[in-house]
Image (tube, helix red, strand yellow):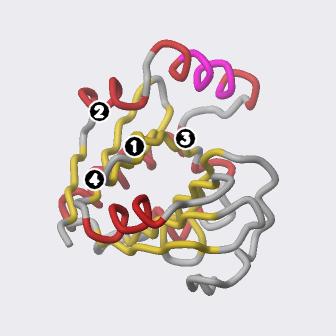
Amino acid sequence: MKIEKGMKFEAEIDSLGTVMDYVEDRFIFVIKDQFWNDVELEMAAHMPMEIDFAYRYDIAIFLLSVGDIDTSDFYFNIQENDWAKQLLAVDDCLQCTLVLLDEKNTICFKRDATLSKEDSARIIDCLKKQYEVPFHEGEFDVNMEGLMSALEPFEMQEYALVKAIFER
């Protein structure tokens, strides 16, 4: 997947908010807003970026913070991912990309990060557990909505199994 500033994002994202997926060889975290001002883009480019990972009730949750942009939560279900087998076979460092989109699905910002081998192994271990859990879409959705209503994304950070900070 080609991701470059100024390009139209390959996947059409309909609504504002957050979405993530694992595609080809990386986790892609997308935050879509009506527009991104210069101050927000500068903070995203130069402030530390934190990626946390929590695993609760068989749900994988990535939490992303950068600058003054509110902590964003991304829920991931490996059983619904087209690249699940490739992801579970990763025995090296996981790659991540943050993408900020405007309302027209134009890429306003991109930032890459590489998780440590140790953090990557923790995440893969949890995803292997999630892969083995019998999947019932309705149950997953109810559990996810329960977590979302019980805790704000920044409150979930205390449950993180992985806390990775990337300086600029």
* Spatial CA span between label 2 and label 4: 10 Å
Residues at discs 1 and 4 in contact (Cβ within 8 Å) = yes
Q: Residue at x 59, y 26 (%)?
A: 144
Disc 3 or disc 2, which is closer to the eye? 2
Residues at discs 2 and 1 in contact (Cβ within 8 Å) = yes
Q: What secondary structure is found at the residue carrying circle 1?
A: strand
Q: Which residue is mark 2?
A: 157
Q: Earlier in the sequence, mark 3 or mark 1?
A: 1
* Spatial CA span between label 1 and label 4: 8 Å
Horizontal arrangement in the rendering, residue 123 relative to residue 21 (left or right): left
The spot of residue 60 in percent (x, y) is: 46, 40
Q: Residue at x 43, y 23 (%)?
A: 152
Q: Earlier in the sequence, mark 2 or mark 1?
A: 1
Horizontal arrangement in the rendering, residue 150 relative to residue 155 (left or right): right
The foreground one among 76 and 11 is 11
Q: Amino acid at mark 2?
A: Gln
147 up-or-down from 19: above or below = above
Q: Quadrant of the C terminus?
A: bottom left
Q: Within 10 angstroms of label 4, few (less than 14), some, or many (20 or more) residues? A: some
Disc 4 or disc 3, which is closer to the eye? 4
